[in-house]
């Protein structure tokens, strides 16, 4: 979900296509969702348990902007643990990136 006020739906779509993302992207007009979750960075991840509507993981996707230097896949680890019914070992990490433009 893109919450940057400065980027249009067309900008988001173009970025998605240029990066060849294989997942849907949505536009958060008016920063409604970002404000609800208190998002400050892009990217910043919130994994929500839909049965309790609670955030079970919040933070970064991984520990490096360069894919070949990643040593910790934080989001993948949290999702694997959550989906297996295990306790999430690391529930929060520090997200890094640009600030959400409001």
Image (cartoon, rainbow, N blue to C red):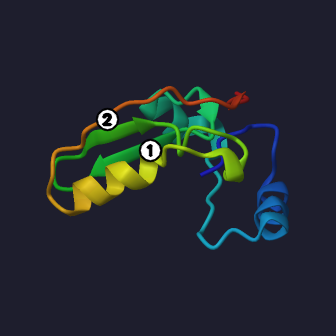
Give the numbered dot on residue 13.
none
- In what quadrant of the picture does the C terminus appear? top right
Q: In the displayed structure, would residue 58 be above or below residue 66? A: above
- In this rendering, the answer to whether 89 lies above or below 84 is above
Horizontal relation, residue 78 to residue 67: left or right: left
Task: Kindly identify the residue that appears in the image at 70 percent across and 41 percent down.
Answer: 65
Q: Nearer the viewer, residue 41 or 78?
A: 78
Badge 1 element: helix
Q: Nearer the viewer, residue 27 or 71?
A: 71
Q: Which mark is residue 74?
A: 1
> Residue 11: x and y, percent?
84, 56
Cα separation, mark 1 vs mark 2, equals 8 Å
Check whether the beta carbons of the residues at disc 1 and disc 2 lie within 8 A of each other: yes
Residue 31 rendering spot, x and y as whole percentages? 60, 37
Please state if 85 lies on the left or on the right of 38 as rendered: left
Identify which residue is drawn at 73% across, 46% down. 66
Q: 32 and 46: which one is in front?
A: 46
Sort mark 2 into few (<14), some (14-19) or many (20+) by Cα contacts within 10 Å.
some
From the top left corner, tell me how far across and down residue 42 is, in percent. Answer: 65, 37
* Residue at 59%, 70% in the rendered image: 23
Q: Which of the numbered marks, if any, corresponds to residue 90?
A: 2
């Amino acid at each position: 979900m893109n919450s940057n006020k400065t980027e249009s739906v067309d900008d988001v779509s173009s970025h998605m296509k240029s990066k060849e993302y294989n997942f849907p992207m949505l536009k958060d007009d008016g920063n409604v969702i970002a404000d609800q979750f208190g998002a400050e960075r892009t990217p910043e991840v919130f994994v929500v348990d839909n049965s309790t509507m609670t955030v079970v993981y919040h933070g970064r996707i991984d520990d490096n902007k360069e894919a070949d230097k990643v040593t910790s896949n934080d989001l993948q680890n949290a999702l694997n643990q959550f989906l297996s019914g295990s306790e999430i070992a690391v529930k929060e990490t520090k997200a890094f990136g640009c600030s959400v433009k409001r």
